Image: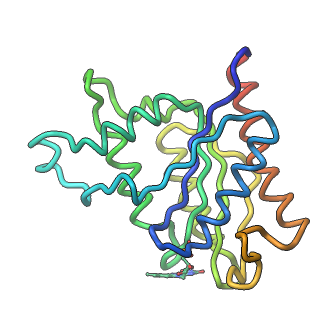
Amino acid sequence: MTTSPRLLAFAGSLRKDSFNRKLIQTLAEGAREAGAKVTLLELRDHALPLYDGDIEAAGMPNAVRTLQSMMAEHDGLLIATPEYNGAYPALIKNTLDWISRPLDDGKAGTTLFAGKIAGLCSASPGGLGGLRALLTLRDALAKLGMWVAPSQVAVGRAGEVFDDQGNLTDERQRSAVQRVGAEVTTATRRMRLQ
Ligand SMILES: Cc1cc2nc3c(=O)[nH]c(=O)nc-3n(C[C@H](O)[C@H](O)[C@H](O)COP(=O)(O)O)c2cc1C
């Protein structure tokens, strides 16, 4: 493969002090160290309405076209997800749903996901670290045709585990999160070779 894998990374939270926004940095770091080019996407900068077929029929929002283009330009996804009531947040679902809608040229938006690789982590102030969100998000991405990396890390007690710069203070935990990013990078390379 001649070019580095390109990965699109985002946190599924709009909150300024989001733990998952901190976590996505570490996930991205692991991918970069393994040779990927990572684009950090801030969902707040691409505000989407709640999916509504009438809005779509009236004309696809520009933010959807922008996100579809970004997805087309990348080989895979890195996502740090919060857990809301035992599942991944509506923000992520809404984003995936809009991107999956038909492209400008009429092709299915799901083709933007199919055969690409995703890596997931989660952070939560609770003890389980958002583990249930990881399971539900894994399913949703598989439905879109993505291969989801087997490794994942649910970071619990999130209010206590990041330093002032947003780094995980526990070296083993930081390495485990970085390994997820590295795994996605390596798997993307292998996938491209075939
Ligand atoms: C509607 C709602 C439901 C939540 N449900 C859960 C939950 O099921 N499990 C959990 O661990 N935390 C839950 N939380 C707490 C979130 O983990 C916490 O708000 C976290 O900081 C969100 O991620 P962020 O820091 O990246 O924004 C919930 C929070 C909200 C607002």
Q: Nearer the viewer, residue 9 or 187?
A: 9
Locate residue 62 relative to residue 19 in the image: left or right.
left
Q: Quadrant of the C terminus?
A: top right
Residue lying at 72% horizontally and 70% vertically, measured from the top left = 165
Q: In which quarter of the image is residue 25?
A: bottom right
Residue lying at 26% horizontally and 60% vertically, measured from the top left = 50
Locate residue 73 relative to residue 33 in the image: left or right.
left
Locate residue 30 relative to residue 191 in the image: left or right.
right
Q: Residue furthest right?
A: 172
Where residue 3 sits in the image (x, y, percent)?
69, 20
Q: Which of 77 and 29 is in front in this view?
A: 29
Q: Quadrant of residue 164?
A: bottom right
Q: In which quarter of the image is the N terminus?
A: top right
* 168 lies above or below 48: below
Where residue 131 sits in the image (x, y, percent)?
65, 70
* 46 lies above or below 33: below
Residue lying at 28% horizontally and 33% vertically, measured from the top left = 102
Residue lying at 78% horizontally and 33% vertically, measured from the top left = 35
Q: How many numbered circles are shown?
A: 0
* 128 lies above or below 70: below
Where residue 79 sits in the image (x, y, percent)?
59, 54
Q: Which of 75 and 63 is in front in this view?
A: 63
Where residue 70 sits in the image (x, y, percent)?
45, 36
